[in-house]
Amino acid sequence: MSEGIMQADKPDTVVGGETDLFSKFDDLIAMRQGLLDGGITDPFSLVMEKVLSPTRAICNGRDTILLGTYNYMGMTFDPDVVDAGKQALADFGTGTTGSRVLNGTYQGHKECEDALKEFYGMDHAMVFSTGYQANLGIISTLAGKGDYIVLDIDSHASIWDGCKLGDAEIVPFKHNDIEAMEKRLKRIPEGAGKLVILEGVYSMLGDVAPLKEMVRIAKENGAMVLVDEAHSMGFIGDNGRGVVEDAGVEDDVDFIIGTFSKSVGTVGGFCVSNHPKFEIMRLVCRPYVFTASLPPSVVATAEASIRKLMHGSEKRAHLWENSKRLHAGLKALGFQLGTDTPQSAIVAVIMPDLTQGATMWEALLHEGLYVNLARPPATPANMTLLRCSLCAEHSEEEVETILGMFERAGKMVGII
């Protein structure tokens, strides 16, 4: 599953009368140690010593191009966004020290929610402390015991965890398979509560869901629909509202979940909705009620960024050009990619296996390029991927430089 559950199902062992709760991870420990013993830098412990811009950082003492962040629209160093955070830090301090339902709602939280309502053209917006919590909270609160959740098998870990927390019946279907989704919906008992959960862009391969058909089928079968737009907000759709907008189903979707840690360039999560009863979620959603709210500086940067994204058409167009250029270039070099055509800002390069994937990752790092190494079980079909996440701030010249790095590393490792 996409960014799915990372722990193994191996049972714990008993050593000297004491249960070793870590034994279930022995295979993962051995895999990691095997990579390190082979002389490969730990790909999951990279430290960025200094961040220079949305596209460059100092890693291991070297100026490195960043192609493995979710900073799609390059908002992390936008001067207006940074200034908004500085002002809020000076005016309101470092944190709220409280929940949103107690002392944790500042003016900035309401203004951020107002910006989200304006951005999406929705009546309600609810900000969470992380994107993970947004899925965890909304899903577990909406669908409980006796309800049914129909979801794509490649759904993000936060979606699966939200399903588990709510104790609903979970009915997965094959990735992006419209017919399979419909069959499962039709098997649900008459009168049961039904929630269909989809993602606009799936984060591992960067492929897009056929939302137009799926939303129509969900509604025909009496289900509510939630779409996670974490990896599409900001640049897909004429106004950057995501695949929901691009597919023309904004009025048919009940809930849109998103995050501030991608295109918005900070941290936090949200849900927007037009449902007339939505505001009750503030009192019944445990991951919202029982956690501290975001610091004032964070919601200030989020609001400033969201309002700038409303006018980001030029940046969106440039990001699409970057995606097309990188996808075409890697394909021409002979790399196997996750999608036949560019569908998002994610370009996934499929590796033969984990060892060669880690070797290729390290070779790229030595070239001065950082990408994500993604491995099973977080990836679909047990694939090892080098996941490239483009940014609107990458120049045309940087993309050409990246292609040269991939060519040299790929030939050295023997993948092309």
Image: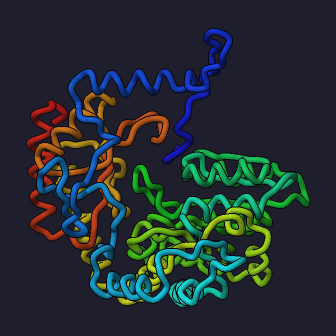
Q: Position of residue 123 (x, y in %)?
A: 66, 88
Judge from the rendering whether residue 303 lies leftward or rightward of residue 152; answer left or right: left
Q: Position of residue 126 (x, y in %)?
A: 63, 77
- The quarter holding residue 135 reads bottom right
Q: Is residue 276 above or below residue 41?
A: below
- The quarter holding residue 251 reads bottom right
Judge from the rendering whether residue 46 lies leftward or rightward of residue 287; answer left or right: left
Q: Is residue 397 above or below residue 81?
A: above
Q: Is residue 349 above or below residue 193?
A: above
Judge from the rendering whether residue 63 lies leftward or rightward of residue 226; answer left or right: left
Q: How is the image coloured?
A: rainbow
Depth check, front residue: 300 or 337: 300
Residue at image location 15% in from the left, 62% down from the top: 399
Residue at image location 54% in from the left, 47% down from the top: 154
Residue at image location 9% in from the left, 66% down from the top: 397
Q: Which residue of the protein is positioned furthest toward the right in this rendering?
A: 191
